[in-house]
Amino acid sequence: MLSTLAFSSGFSVSRSPVSQGRAGAPAMLYGEPRPVQIIPSVLPADWANMGAECKRLEDAGVDRIQFDVMDGNFVPNLTFGPELIAACKKYTTVKFETQLMVSQYNCETMLDEYTAATNQPGKPGVVIAHVEGNTHLHRTLTKIREGGGSPSVALNPHTPAEMIENVLDLCDHVLVMTVNPGFGGQAYIPTMVDKIKKIRGWIVDRGLDIDIEVDGGVKADWTIAACADAGANCFIAGSGMFAYENLADGCSELRTIAEAAQKGKGLPKGETIKDLDAVAA
Ligand SMILES: O=C(CO)[C@@H](O)[C@H](O)COP(=O)(O)O
């Protein structure tokens, strides 16, 4: 069955839903699903034991670990330097990613150091540059690639999708922020799904090999389901992951709900993974 999707930029595309959702509702995911990746943010971790915390996350089955780099300027908070990130590589082989929530000056002067700290042997680290912090995005993203990293570009919630349209050829990932960056534990902004859908439309229609990441208030509930349904496949979760005593449970629940949503089994507000299991049974 073909349906037509109208994007807010004014264009529309015909598409095949990947499957039928619950109660016969058509699945919304546009194009073929990309592998779900669960990426905890270490903001809620025990910072005094960061190496051990990274190992704990690796043992839980996560796909990457995100370090939120904050400089007290681009955002009103201060976190990790490249030395701390590099030091954690002694304790885990899981891939790292670094979200540079920093001013243009700090990005330009420290980008190579952060890229080197984020790369693991034989595994390019994902380095995320913010649209709002970089006047010369082509230069920043190219430098990340030249440093052996995997470039990603991030958008604050108020920033329109169009701001990254002309750098998609330089990126492996686009990060749609679902909170204003600076702090963990904030409430997910549900209106970001339209932005995710628009970017997903460009990626699929142009045949680009790009993941969409989402970050902020993403939990093992309707929030991750809505993002997966819109086209995100990489899910950054801080409080949503560390809420679990057994991190493997958190990783598995986040993954299960996202994969179900990709297949058209969404999770309405108020329902839990148990309701999903009940439908599958
Ligand atoms: O970049 C940020 C915040 O600036 C995020 O990575 C958050 O740290 C995610 O935390 P939760 O919203 O999942 O608690």
Image (cartoon, rainbow, N blue to C red):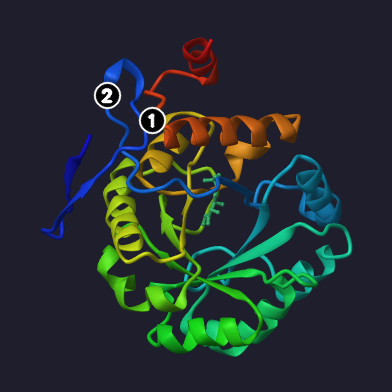
Kind of residue indicated by mark 2: Ala
The image shows residue 146, relative to residue 169, as above or below, that is below
Please give the label number shown on residue 264. Answer: 1
The residue shown at (34%, 52%) is: 196
Q: Which residue is mark 2?
A: 25
Q: Nearer the viewer, residue 246 or 63?
A: 63
Q: Residues within 10 Å of mark 2 (few under 14, many from 20)?
A: few
Q: Quadrant of the N terminus?
A: top left
Kind of residue indicated by mark 1: Gly
Q: Position of residue 61 (x, y in %)?
A: 74, 42
Label 2 near ligand 1 (CB < 8 Å): no
* Label 2–label 1 contact, CB within 8 A: yes
Q: Position of residue 279 (x, y in %)?
A: 47, 13
Q: Quadrant of the C terminus?
A: top right
Label 1 near ligand 1 (CB < 8 Å): no
Sequence-first tag of 2 and 1: 2
